[in-house]
Image: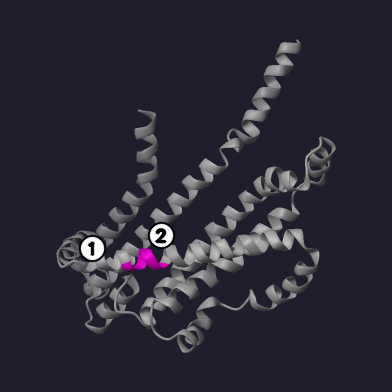
C-alpha cells in the first residue's frame, strides 16, 4: 500500500501538468487566444503519436537516439574517471591538466559541433564524440574534486592500521569520490541530451532530433510535440536509472543524519 501511494505521489505532478495543458488547449480552441495548431492538446498528440508509432518511425528514432546517448555517455564517463584517477595519483599531471581544463571547460560543447563534423564527417562518430565530450568535462571535474575532498584523517587512519597505498586508494579514496562522480554524471546527462538532439538536427537521418527537423520542414506541429515529449520521457528514464544506480552503489549511506540522530538518542536513553 505504501509503495502504491509513493508511486501516485511521484506521478501526480506529471498528471497535473498534462491536465492543465489539456484544459488550456481546449479553452484556446474556443476563445482562440492564438492559433490552436501551435499548441495541440495532449489527447490530440496521443492520437497522432499512436498513428505515427504504427509507421515504426518512433521506435526507430528512440533506438537510434538511445544508442547514441548510451555510447557517448559511457565513453565520456569512462575516459573522465580514468583521467581523474591519474590526476589524483600524479600531482605533476594535475598541474598540466588543470590550466587546460580552465581554458576549455567554459566553451559550450555545441559550439564544437561544426568542427566535429569537419574533422569526422557526417555520420555516427561525430555525434558520439560530441556527447562523450559533453559528458567528459563535468564528470572529470567532479570526480577530481571528490578525490581531493577525502578527509586526510581517513587516509592516515587506514595507513596506521596497516593498509597499503593500493588499499587506501581502492577502499577509502574511490568510495569517497563516487558520490561526486555520480553528481557529475547527473549534470552531464542533461547536457549530453542537448548535444544529442542538436547533433541529430544538424546532420542525421534518424533519431528524435531528426524527427523535429522533419516535422518542421513539413509544418507537422503535432509531430514536433510528440518528438519533444519523447525526448523528455527518454531523459527521465535515463535519469531514473542513474538514480537507481546511485542508490545501489551508495546504499552504505542509507539513513544519513536522521539515522545517526536516532541511534544517538537510543544510546543516550540506554545510559539513563
Instruction: Residue at 65% x, 45% y: name it.
Output: 175
Instruction: Residue at 32% x, 68% y: name it.
Output: 64
Between disc 1 and disc 2, whose residue precedes? 1
Dividing the picture into quarters, in which one does residue 269 lie? top right
Point out residue 7 in the picture as x, y percentages from the top left corner. Answer: 36, 39
Magenta run includes residue 260: no
Point out residue 59 in the picture as x, y percentages from the top left corner. Answer: 24, 63
Q: How is the image coloured?
A: one colour
Q: Is residue 187 above or below residue 112?
A: above
Drawn side of residue 9 relative to residue 101, left or right: left
Q: Nearer the viewer, residue 221 or 88?
A: 88
The magenta segment = 64-68
Q: Which residue is mark 1?
A: 41
Point out residue 114 in the picture as x, y percentages from the top left corner. Answer: 48, 86
Query: Residue 235, labelled with which disc?
Result: 2
Mark 1 or 2: the one toward you: 2
Query: How many angstroms separate mark 1 from mark 2 (CA)?
Result: 22 Å
Instruction: Residue at 70% x, 76% y: name it.
Output: 100
Q: Nearer the viewer, residue 77 or 36?
A: 77
Drawn side of residue 106 relative to residue 244, left or right: right
**Secondary structure of the magenta portion, mostly?**
helix
Q: Is residue 213 above or below residue 253?
A: below
How busy is the neighbourhood of tag 1: few (under 14 within 10 Å), some, or many (20 plus)? many
- Rendered-image quadrant of the C terminus: top right
Query: What SS does tag 1 mark?
Result: loop
Q: Is residue 245 above or below residue 202?
A: above
Point out residue 178 in the picture as x, y percentages from the top left corner. Answer: 62, 50
Instruction: Residue at 49% x, 83% y: name it.
Output: 116
Query: Residue 218, labelled with which disc?
Result: none
Q: Is residue 150 above or below residue 262?
A: below
Query: What SS does tag 2 mark?
Result: helix
Amino acid at each position: 500500500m505504501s509503495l502504491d501511494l509513493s508511486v501516485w505521489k511521484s506521478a501526480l505532478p506529471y498528471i497535473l501538468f498534462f491536465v492543465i495543458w489539456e484544459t488550456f488547449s481546449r479553452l484556446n480552441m474556443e476563445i482562440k487566444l492564438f492559433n490552436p495548431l501551435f499548441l495541440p492538446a495532449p489527447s490530440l498528440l496521443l492520437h497522432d503519436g499512436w498513428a505515427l508509432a504504427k509507421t515504426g518511425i518512433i521506435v526507430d528514432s528512440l533506438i537510434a537516439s538511445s544508442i547514441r546517448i548510451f555510447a557517448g555517455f559511457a565513453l565520456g564517463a569512462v575516459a573522465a574517471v580514468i583521467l581523474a584517477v591519474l590526476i589524483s595519483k600524479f600531482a605533476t599531471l594535475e598541474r598540466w591538466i588543470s590550466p587546460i581544463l580552465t581554458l576549455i571547460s567554459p566553451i559550450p560543447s555545441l559550439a564544437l559541433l561544426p568542427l566535429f563534423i569537419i574533422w569526422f564527417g557526417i555520420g555516427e562518430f561525430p555525434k558520439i564524440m560530441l556527447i562523450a565530450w559533453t559528458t567528459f568535462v563535468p564528470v572529470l571535474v567532479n570526480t577530481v574534486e571528490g578525490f581531493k575532498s577525502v578527509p586526510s584523517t581517513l587516509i592516515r587512519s587506514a595507513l596506521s592500521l596497516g593498509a597499503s597505498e593500493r588499499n587506501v586508494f581502492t577502499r577509502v579514496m574511490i568510495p569517497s569520490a563516487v558520490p561526486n562522480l555520480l553528481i557529475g554524471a547527473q549534470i552531464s546527462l542533461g547536457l549530453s541530451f542537448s548535444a544529442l538532439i542538436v547533433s541529430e538536427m544538424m546532420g542525421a537521418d534518424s533519431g528524435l532530433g531528426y524527427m523535429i527537423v522533419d516535422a518542421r520542414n513539413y509544418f507537422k506541429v503535432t509531430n514536433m510535440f510528440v518528438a519533444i515529449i519523447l525526448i523528455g520521457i527518454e531523459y527521465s528514464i535515463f535519469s531514473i536509472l542513474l538514480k537507481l544506480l546511485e542508490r545501489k552503489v551508495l546504499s552504505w549511506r542509507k539513513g544519513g543524519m536522521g539515522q545517526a540522530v536516532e541511534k544517538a538518542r537510543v544510546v543516550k536513553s540506554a545510559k539513563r
